[in-house]
Image (cartoon, rainbow, N blue to C red):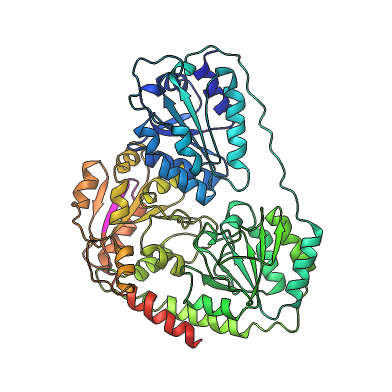
Amino acid sequence: MKASDLFVKALENEGVEFIFGVPGEENLDFLQSLKNSSIKLIVNRHEQGAGFMAATYGRLTGKPGVCLATLGPGATNLVTPAAYAQLGGMPMMMITGQKPIKKSKQARFQIIDVVDMMRPVTKYTKQIVNSNNIASQVREAFRIAIEEKPGAVHLEFPEDIAQEECEDLVFDVVGHIIPKPDDRAVSKAVEMINKSKLPLLLIGAGANRKVTCDALGKFVDKTGIFFFTTQMGKGVIDERHQQYLGTAALSSNDFVHAAIDAADLIINVGHDVIEKPPFFMKKGEKEVIHVNFSPAEVDPVYFPQLNVVGDITSSVNKLGEGIQIQDSWDFSFFKKIKKEVAGHLSKYFEDERFPMLPQRLINLLRNKLASEDIVTLDNGIYKLWFARNYTCYQPNTLLLDNALASMGAGLPSAMMAKILNPGKNVISVCGDGGFMMNSQEIETSVRLGLHLTVIILNDSAYGMIKWKQEDMGFEDFGLDYKNPDFVMYAESYGAKGHRPENDSDFQKILEECLNTPAVHLIDLPVDYSLNHPILNVMLKEKAEKL
């Protein structure tokens, strides 16, 4: 059969549902083969949008999302989504075209070494040089993408190889079972926990990738051990749980860090050093047990004393079976912290000033959305407020990135979340800077007929960097810009634009957006005046007093 037909057949064999992309002339044979496939092609307006959608598909399903681009500039535009997926543990496959490799009449036009370029940001990257290798290379790429830790893979498909005749062959999809942890490591961990005076549980992104909710919930319920999460570990256990202390949105000097400092042992489930550190280890202080699919990468701020390696769910279940509640455990200080956190986080929930405080927006969204509804974030200072203040009731209902922390992913990730969850409300909260990096995907959203709400927090500046600039004592400089009329911009694509004038107006608009099927965009002025006094000054002072 034709090589491009075999490639598509191999993807169908892997259960691929969608391919997101911006095709070029080097993809035309593949595109023709895709025409009669069960796989749905979704054409994006930029390769970044396609890559972010594919990565989010992987994040939410555990199966590799697939994206397509041409050679040269098309391929280079996939580098950021590749790094996003690779660092974030999201299985994703990229397919890029290339000029003929056996005989080309275009010299070096548009040609760069894409395979070499992709190597630092993928788990696997290959050029297909023989059509009879397509089936095995696709199977291998998918196997590697899914294997812990999941990530990005890449295949380059040259024009002349796509046109070849080859053997009609695909390989069976063979999975594998992640080994259970070694009993000796579990026994040592149980001994350390039973001997500790004040143990504390940390839940990271790895625990969000697999079905660990029940195991961790039972662990906390049985032992009474308090827990906190990293930003990407939010929602694994319902955050209304009485043992939940908060999310480490910062690396230090928050209320939760007072609890971390008091603990003599941290049971760290599913975290690795790629995510921004939730705390800093120091030699001679508290001990850390690393529970994950692979051993800890040693870092100056993270060097656990014990690794419990294997399937996380099995590890947590075994630990729960072995641990005995100790009379010496006194969680009264953690209870005090929890009370302080609750009072602090809710302080501005009812503040109706306008432009709107991020804390107020978070409260309004949480009250309006159901447990299973999804909020996606782009990257900006508001991400810290959401990580700290937004209460997640279920896993993967607040999609944020704290690994690459790329701007531009908020809208594409919301689009993917909505496609996979048509019955749920999906809201994307973006800064004006991050939104404009992939704003053209509004057209894709409208074309796909999605019911989606995008809230743009408008401060006409790169607010996260302004916050850092102020914290470092520098003058306000170089971070302001002008925005388009976002209402007119949305409507030019066929979306519905809204601009609230006050708090009450926003609530009415939000209600309309959630109940009226369409792509909605809300241009919401935001008040960031409390960023520095709270996050840089007040938290440090109060945490030190605790």
- Residue 517 lies within the magenta run: yes
Viewer-closest of 84 and 15: 84
Name the foreground residue: 482 vs 473: 473
Span of residues in magenta:
516-523
Residue 543 x %, y %:
48, 82
Q: Residue at x 20, y 54 (%)?
A: 483
The residue at the point 33 percent across, 64 percent down is 464
Residue 144 screen position, x and y as percent: 61, 39
Q: Is residue 52 visible?
A: no
107, 54: nearer the viewer: 107
Q: Residue 473 sits in which quadrant?
A: bottom left
Position of 229 with respect to 43 (left or right) is right
Tell me where residue 24 appears, x and y as whole percent: 36, 26
Q: Nearer the viewer, residue 266 or 459?
A: 266
Asked whether, in this view, residue 441 is left or right of residue 195, the answer is left
Residue 245, visible in the rendered structure: yes
